[in-house]
Amino acid sequence: MLPQQWVLGAKVPFPESNTVEFKRVAVFSGLFTQQTKQASGLPKYKETLNAFLNSSGGYLIMGILDDGTIMGVDGLTEEARDKFNLWVDSCFNSFVYKDGSPLDPTRVFLKAHIFPVVASASATSVILASATSVILASATSVIVVEAINKGPPLNIMNRDGTILYRLNASNYKITAEPVYRKRDVRGMISAIKDHMQKIIDEKHRAIQDLQEKHHLEVLDYIDTIRKYEKRSLCSQIFALFGC
């Protein structure tokens, strides 16, 4: 489906649809220099990938105008590429099945592809002797994220319980019951209870040890007083009888 060659200024042979989304993204590195992710557009791209996974799959293509014109993206540095690959991985890890279980990576996956953009033969760049196109002097590329789901549709959600699906060229949301949340909250509450019970038990043991220690000390004190009183009584008796 994807073109064999991405030519600057040409149009891709397909429009946006339920399986294709175009994004301009003039400067690729700018995606990761915004103060917030919301300002960079990455959250919207993530929603599109989720929507593709809940249908028959699809392609998020960066460096293409809305009308399908190939412009490419600049600023594809090694650092930006690494950050983008990490972002794609984080998108995958943030999706779960509706029952809260993690995705099966043998049936659901995201693939990132990078294609060079070339100029037409009439462009004033370095001409390749045996080709009808030339590679742009500036490193301009088209970035494609391919979303594939070999499982049932409408079965993948974000961790906030939202399922997105693709209709024509737009994303639509369905709010699902976040089963994983209930499970995680129950587990968290249970863990907190166990931890608190452990603290309480330790405090009880410490109090019991303290009580036993003081009880023994009190008994020793009482025994000492009794011995003293007994000796004192004997002394008084001896004094009375002139012993």
Image: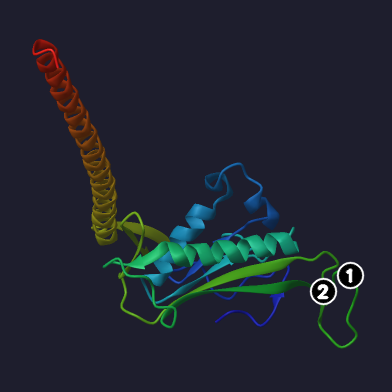
Q: Tell me whether the residue at label 2 lies in contact with that at label 1, contact meaning CB atoms closer than 8 angstroms.
A: yes
Q: In terms of sequence position, does the residue under pointer 2 or pointer 1 come before the other?
A: 1
**Pointer 2 residue:** 135
Question: Is residue 232 positioned above or below 221 on the image?
Answer: above
Picture quarter containing residue 65? bottom right
Residue at 55% from the left image edge and 51% from the top image edge: 41
In the rendered view of the protein, which quadrant contains the N terminus? bottom right
- The front one of 194 and 139 is 194
| Three-letter amino acid code of the residue under disc 1 | Ser
- Residue at the bottom extreme? 130
Q: Position of residue 22 (x, y in %)?
A: 55, 63
| Three-letter amino acid code of the residue under disc 2 | Ile
Q: Position of residue 104 (x, y in %)?
A: 39, 78
Measure how far apart labels 2 and 1 are at the Cα level: 8 Å
Q: Position of residue 119 (x, y in %)?
A: 79, 71
In this view, the mark in front (2 or 1): 2
Q: Is residue 172 left or right of residue 49?
A: left
Q: Position of residue 147 (x, y in %)?
A: 48, 73
Residue at 21% from the left image edge and 28% from the top image edge: 224
One can see residue 116 in this view = yes
Label 2: few (<14), some or many (≥20) within 10 Å? many
**Pointer 1 residue:** 125
Residue at 75% from the left image edge and 65% from the top image edge: 140
Q: Determine whether the residue tagged by mark 1 lies in a helix, strand or loop.
A: loop
- The front one of 240 and 147 is 240
Question: Is residue 195 positioned above or below 114 on the image?
Answer: above
